[in-house]
Image: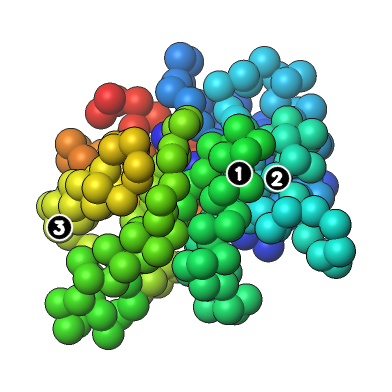
Amino acid sequence: MIIANFKSNGSEQMIVRWVQDFISNIDNNHTTLGIAPPYTYIEKLERLLSDANQNNLKVGAQDVGVGSGAKTGSVSSSMLADLNCNFAIIGHSERRKIFNESNELIREKLKNLISSKLTPVLCVGESYSDFENKKTLITIKEQLNECLLDIHIPQDIIIAYEPLWAIGSGKTPNPTDVNEINEYIKDVVQSATSNNYVPSVCYGGSVDVANAGSFFDCSNIDGALVGGASLDGKKFALIANEFNRNN
Ligand code: PGA
């Protein structure tokens, strides 16, 4: 799956333009795609996509709260289900860093998404210092084990491998290395989940039109989580077309 993460970007006008640009550039019969706008634009985007018969483009959220009730500012998984969301991203490095989210909290979010039957897109990835010190696999294993501890996965979940140093930086790891890391992630998830679940694993971090194909050529890279380049409907469509050609 190719997923657009708008982060805290966009406006009513931008969303309308985005859908027009996407539709003018996307190939027919594309695979399922995901788009995560800010909460405030979810319904508008769903309406625009449905009016344009773009039923293969699923709308999701960039995060989810932990349960409902006395949690000011929090949006629960059942509220996202009411909005017809298909998935939610959890554990993005920006949430971990800016909002101090721990693996334990992310695990609670994961459980909530599972209970509302939404597809979780769980992000993991190492810092630059971990990368330099060859601790990538150790960091990822710890994140996965703590987020997935004793979790039974009854539905699809997607893992997004996103090295922190590649996000928004224009730097990318070698696709062959990512392919090996993604294979490792599949093994770790299989061992960590109580029902031996093997997930799809995407890559995220400075994916753009020019480099997307080099990632999609790799057998263990099952898609991409795209930030900056996804803000342009044309670029996102061209990345999705690249994925279609490789799958
Ligand atoms: P980027 O963001 O594509 O702008 O690097 C990816 C992400 O943060 O998910």
Q: Earlier in the sequence, mark 2 or mark 1?
A: 2
Mark 3: amino acid: Asp
Residue at 47% over, 67% down: 103
Which residue is under mark 1? 113
Return the residue nearer the eye: 240 or 195: 195
- The verdict on label 3 being within 8 Å of ligand 1 is no
Residue 208 can be seen, yes or no: no
Q: SS at mark 3? A: helix
Distance from the alpha carbon under mark 2 to that under mark 1: 6 Å
Residue at 27% over, 85% down: 129
Residue at 15% over, 57% down: 177
Is 180 located above or below residue 219 in the figure?
Answer: below
Place of residue 145 in the rendered image (x, y in percent of width and height, measured from the top left): 34, 60
Q: SS at mark 2? A: helix
Mark 1: amino acid: Leu
Question: Which label sits in the foreground, 1 or 3?
Answer: 1
Mark 2: amino acid: Ser
Place of residue 151 in the rendered image (x, y in percent of width and height, measured from the top left): 44, 47
User: Within 10 Å of the Cα at label 2, are there few (<14), some (14-19), or many (20+) other Cα atoms?
Assistant: many
Return the residue nearer the eye: 148 or 46: 148
State left or right for residue 220 relative to residue 56. left
Residue 93 can be seen, yes or no: yes
Which residue is under mark 3? 177
User: Within 10 Å of the Cα at label 3, are there few (<14), some (14-19), or many (20+) other Cα atoms?
Assistant: few
Is 26 located above or below residue 151 in the figure?
Answer: above
State left or right for residue 23 relative to residue 77. left
Question: Which label sits in the foreground, 3 or 2?
Answer: 2
Which residue is under mark 2? 77
Distance from the alpha carbon under mark 1 to that under mark 3: 30 Å
Do residues under tags 3 and 2 come within 8 Å of each other at their CB atoms? no
Looking at the rendered image, the quarter that the C terminus falls into is top left
